[in-house]
Each structure stands twice: as structure tokens, then as C-alpha cells.
Amino acid sequence: MNAAITLLTSLLTVQSPQSSTLLLPCSNSTTIIPLSTTLLSSRALSATNQEYREVGWEVIKGVGDTVIEEGIPMHVFVEEMGEEDMSPYSKDSVYPSKYGYSPGAFTGTPTSLPHLSPNFNTSGSLLSLPIYPSILLENFLFSPKTSTDVTRLKSGYDTAFKVIENIWENRMKWDYNVVHPFESSIPIGNREVWEEVLKDVIEEVERVGWRPNPGIPDSVKSLPDYPGDEVYTSCLYLLDCMSSENWVTSNIVSKCNFAMLDVGWMTWLGRGTVALKQIMLITEERNERIASKQEVAMAEKWVSMWESKMNELWDGHGFKNKVSDGVNKTKWISGPGVANEFQSLAGWYSGARKASTDIPDLYVTQHQRDVMVNKLLSDSEGTFNCGHYQVKGTDCTSSYGKIQPFGNYVTGRGMYEGGAEGVGNWVINTTIDMICGRVPGGGGGEGGGGDCEETATFPEYFDYITGMPEGGTCGNGSAITAATYIMAMKGEPSYKFSSSPPLNTTWVLVVIVAELAVACGVGMSCVVFSCRMLKKIRRDERVGEGEEDLFDYLDEDQLEQLGLGGGGEGGIEGQGERDEDWEGGTGIRAAIASFFWV
């Protein structure tokens, strides 16, 4: 794994003004930092050793510095030195430059940048995959879980809660989680799927005769993940519409002709919600509670909402993406294949889930799992029969013949956690073999999967038939693939909850002191009671044996001076009555006396 670790650490970059540590997608990309890739790289580094765990925490903190009102932005733009042009297009990415997210960017001179972080230039209100809570949690689970690690977990909680809250309470209020194709979990380069998804937008663009100004440069059209003129123009048209509506979600959904309930995106939202709930439980168990009762209740509500939405996307044969034209038309898109569907099974921290009944169970049903696994193993649509290297990111009939290792990893984890352990392990191990340049299953063990050092390459995509790298802009140095390789080799973290409720250390000391005080009081009472009983027994025995009692020599006035007057017959008040009570008990008194003799 050293090659992958070396690649990731070489891509670390410190961005002003807060000196935040982030991570470039590759050495060839110098303008855009995708924050999903940055977070996944942080998670991969945290899985290695303590030195890189510290780096992982720094990256988590750096991403937290980029938060905008709506959550974690999709991109941060690298600060460039010297004079900048105002082009809305990037030099080395299909995603626009920071000016492409401004009002008027593609219809004239951009006016102002919308909804920017106070510290960074970002991609407007387009959001990253909601993985921040998951990565924050997993970085902690990989750590030694010291008090410092708990403090770091707590420091990221507010950002994690904000990310999930804004999506559920704002985006999902309109029944959609994606408002632009750039946000989707479906690769933008998958032209066939996007032509179907954006059919209404493409028709709208043609009807109104909208064209970007300036036009799309050849440097963008030549990129490997360029989706074609129709799809790309539609994406720019939507950006122009969104910026003109001031990025208000309700206006975007109703006026910009596109909104989507994305299966893969929905999966990460569910996983992030579970991670948020688990962070609440861990800090509470460690007497560092950070969530209010209201926040806990909200998280539980969101889990129920997730289950309802996933059931809505199930049609009996698989999970489908829900697409709206923004007015009154809804359609269901079955693409891009099982790699997308199986994200719905992605691992839910099984070790922690089994150790605490408070962790929600977000597995899909056994029937849903079986339907998807059977489809994958059959001779139809999205199957293992597309080529030698699996899993293809789309159905076999699609011309988009690329395999994304990260998609494979998520799919394999989903199968494994969903109960199809053998198939899941096979997918992950053959993905490792592909990265290592080996024949699938040839690396030893079930499906191969052994480590490699000299032969590993890290392109963003591989060809699904030949297994050859298709690196695109990043060549063979993609951060997301290097991170995937480390995650596949290191496995999943876990956490074991205590079987009993936690007690604060201070309260433990208070309880111990209180118990000692009570015990001491009871003990002293017993000693005093025993001594008094013993003295009385000895005195009664002496009197019973004819011995003279000291009190017989004292007259009434002397007894009164000692505070013992008024005793009547017998010298001491009540003495006669007590003697009657003990009459005939000499043997018992002797036994007690011998036991308490002092």
C-alpha cells in the first residue's frame, strides 16, 4: 500500500485563508478540489497508521472549514497566483471554473459569486455527497480512541449535523436530493443515461434556442468524461437557471426543469444519518454528550424517512432513480445498472450495529437483496457477464464501458454487508487484482486480492473488457482510486459499545464516598449498641449473683447530680422493668458477652 499512501500524501495542499489542509484529485488537476475525494482520501489515510491518522484528522478539519449555508460544497477552487481570466470553463475538468457558478456566467459577463463560503471559492450551492459524518466517524473508529480523538470527534459534530439536517429539512422537503447532474452519483460521462435523464431539459434547450456564451472550448470537449454537446449544454443551462433563481431550492425544483431522487446519493445520505446517530451514542457513552434530546429525535425521524424513501424507489425488480421535470411529470430511470443499485446495501458499520440496539438497521430487505444478487448473476442486463473485469458501472448493453474502482468497492461492501458475503468478497478482491494488473482471481485466496507494490496503478477508470487503465485527466494517479485500494486492503472499522450505562468519574467517586459514609455510620452504631448491651449484661449478671451495685451506695441527691435521679425503685429509671425482661437469660447474656467482650 505504500505506493497508494505516497500518492495521497503528495496531493495534500494547504489552502488559505485558514491554512486548511485539503487534497487535490491528482497531480494533473490544479484548479478544482472535489471534497468527496478529499474526504475519502482522509478515511483511507486514517486506516493505515498513527502518523497518517493525524493527517486524516487535519483533512477532516480542513473540509469543515469550507462549509457553506447548505452544507459541504461539491468543489473548492484552488487559489491561483497572478492574473486570472473570467472564463466559466476549467482548464482541466468538465466541471466549470468558479465563475461558471455565477449569475450570467454563460450568457454574458458573470456578476457575482453566489453563496460562497466566507473562506473559499466554491461551487455555488451544489453539494458534495453527504459523506462527511461517515468519514468523521470512521476516522475516529480507526483511531486509538483517546481523549484527544474524542475531542476531535466532538469538534466535527456541528458540521456533521448541519450537513444531514440541511439535506433532510431543505432538499428532501421537496422530495429530491439532487438538483443538478453534477451532484449525482452517476458519472457525468455516462452519456446514454444522462440523455435519458435530461430528455426534457434537452428539449427545453432546443425549444428556447439557448446556447452558452462563450461556447464550449475544445479543451473541454476532448476530456475523457465529456458527455457530448447535448448533455453538457443542458448542464450549463441548468446552472444558468439555478443562479438566476438565487440557488433557492424551491425555485430550482419548480422552474429549472430538473430534480432527481438519486439512489446512490440516497444511500450515502442514509449512511451519513446512521453515522450521525452513532456519533451521538459514542459521545454519550464516554460522558461527553453533545447532542440535545431534540437532535436525537430528529436523527431518529430521518432514519424512518430514509427507509420510506428507499421503499418508494423499489419497483419489485430493483431500485430506480426518480426524475422530475420540475412541473408535473415524473419518470423512473433504471440505470446505470447494478453498481448503482448495490450502493443501497453499502456497509453500515456492522460491528457497532451488532453491539448496540440503538444503532438503526438500514439494511434493505432480504427479498430486495436476493432480487439484486440474482439479477447480477443472471444473463440479463447488468451482470457479471459484461466482460472479464467486474462490476461494470452500467448495464451490459450500454456503450459506457468503464469500471470505476470506487463504485466496485461500494458494491462489494454492499453485497458483503447485505448477506452475499462470497460475491461481495469476490468483487472487492477482483477489483484489487485489476488495480494490481493481475488476472482476476490470480492473486491468491478467494478471488485473489493480495497486496501489490510495484505493479499497482491508480487510474480513475478501467476498461471493462481489457482491464486496461483509462485514467482520463488524472492518468494513473487518481486519488480516489488510491484511496479505494487502501480501503479495500484495510477493511472496515468497528466499535464495541459498553453493555451497561456509563457513569461519570466524578459521580463514581461521590457514590463511593457516600457508601463509605453510610457503612461507617452503620458500623459505629453497631459498636455503640454492642458496647451498651455488653455493659448492661455484665451489670445484670453481677446483680443477679448478689454483687453489690455501685448505685446502691448513692443516695437520691447524688443520683440526681449525675443526671440519674428519678429512677424510683432500683436506683435507675426503668431499671426494674429491664431486669424483668432479662430475667432467666443468663446463658444468652453470657454467650453475647463472650462474643462482644471488650
Image: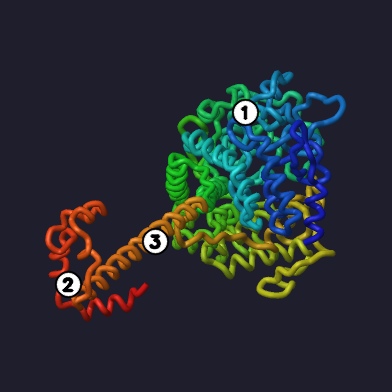
Q: CA distance from mark 2 to mark 1?
A: 111 Å
Residue at screen point 65% across, 52% down: 139
Residue at screen point 79% across, 24% down: 86
Could you say which disc has been placed on residue 519 in the image? 3
Q: Which of these two is toward me, 417 or 20?
A: 20
Q: Given the image, on which type of amino acid does mark 1 rest?
A: Val
Q: Is residue 44 left or right of residue 288?
A: right
Could you say which disc has been placed on residue 205 in the image? 1
State the image coordinates of residue 220 (x, y, percent, origin top left).
Answer: 78, 36
Alpha-carbon neighbours of circle 1 within 10 Å: few (<14), some, or many (≥20)?
some
Classify the position of the C terminus by image quarter.
Answer: bottom left
Q: In the figure, 469 relative to 445: above or below? A: above
Q: In the figure, 127 relative to 520: above or below? A: above
| Residue 274 appears in the rendering | no
Residue at screen point 71% across, 26% down: 212
Q: Which of these two is toward me, 352 or 510?
A: 510
The tag earlier along the polypeptide, 3 or 1, is: 1
Q: Given the image, on which type of amino acid does mark 2 rest?
A: Trp
Mark 2–mark 1 contact, CB under 8 Å?
A: no
Q: Pointer 2: what residue?
A: 582
Q: CA distance from mark 3 to mark 1?
A: 84 Å
Identify the element where label 2 is drawn.
Answer: helix
Image quadrant in which you'd find residue 438: bottom right
Q: Given the image, on which type of amino acid does mark 3 rest?
A: Ala
Q: Nearer the viewer, mark 3 or mark 1?
A: 3
Alpha-carbon neighbours of circle 3 within 10 Å: few (<14), some, or many (≥20)?
few
